[in-house]
Image (cartoon, rainbow, N blue to C red):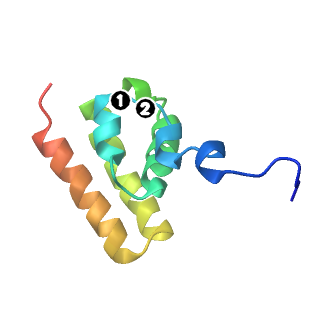
Amino acid sequence: MDLARPRRLDEDTVPFRKSIAGNDLFDQAVEEQDPTLAAVLAETLALVGADPEQLSLDQLGTVLPEVERRLRLLMHAESARSAIMRLRRIVLGWED
């Protein structure tokens, strides 16, 4: 470690979920969730040509099965289940 410049983690790092810019729908979908969700959702949207900043309810509904599949591979079962249930509630209850 460089002693000339002490490292302060709270100034040098950015919380992961905040490093992916998105619209209100994307932000609500990943708000207060495991940072894995933001990355998985953004990557899955890219596969279908969508963008977190332009995410629509139809796009979220379309990628939901693939997001669920990926989360179940990457997260503990209970965490994945919680994130998916939250996304489903957003899709069913979102009002434009």
Residue indicated by mark 2 = 52
In terms of depth relative to the viewer, which is nearer, 30 or 51? Answer: 30
Question: Which residue type does callout 2 highlight?
Answer: Pro
In terms of depth relative to the viewer, which is nearer, 43 or 65? Answer: 43
Identify the image quadrant of residue 55. Answer: top left
Q: SS of the residue at dot 2?
A: helix
Q: SS of the residue at dot 1?
A: loop
Left or right: 67 in relation to 89: right
Quarter of the picture containing the N terminus is bottom right
Left or right: 23 in relation to 82: right
Q: Are marks 1 and 2 in contact (CB under 8 Å)?
A: yes
Mark 1 vs mark 2, CA separation in Å:
5 Å
Image point (15%, 36%), residue name: 94
User: Label 1 neighbourhood size at 10 Å, few (<14), some (14-19), many (20+)?
Assistant: some
- Per the rendering, the mark at residue 17 is none
Establish if 85 lies above or below 6: below
Question: Which residue type does callout 1 highlight?
Answer: Leu
The tally of labels here is 2
Image point (13%, 44%), residue name: 92
Establish if 2 lies above or below 82: above
Image point (21%, 52%), residue name: 88
Q: In the rendering, at what x and y percent does residue 68 appear?
A: 36, 59
Left or right: 64 in relation to 21: left
Residue indicated by mark 1 = 55
Image point (41%, 30%), residue name: 22
Identify the image quadrant of residue 62. Answer: top left
Q: In the rendering, at what x and y percent does residue 13 appear?
A: 62, 46
Quarter of the picture containing the C terminus is top left
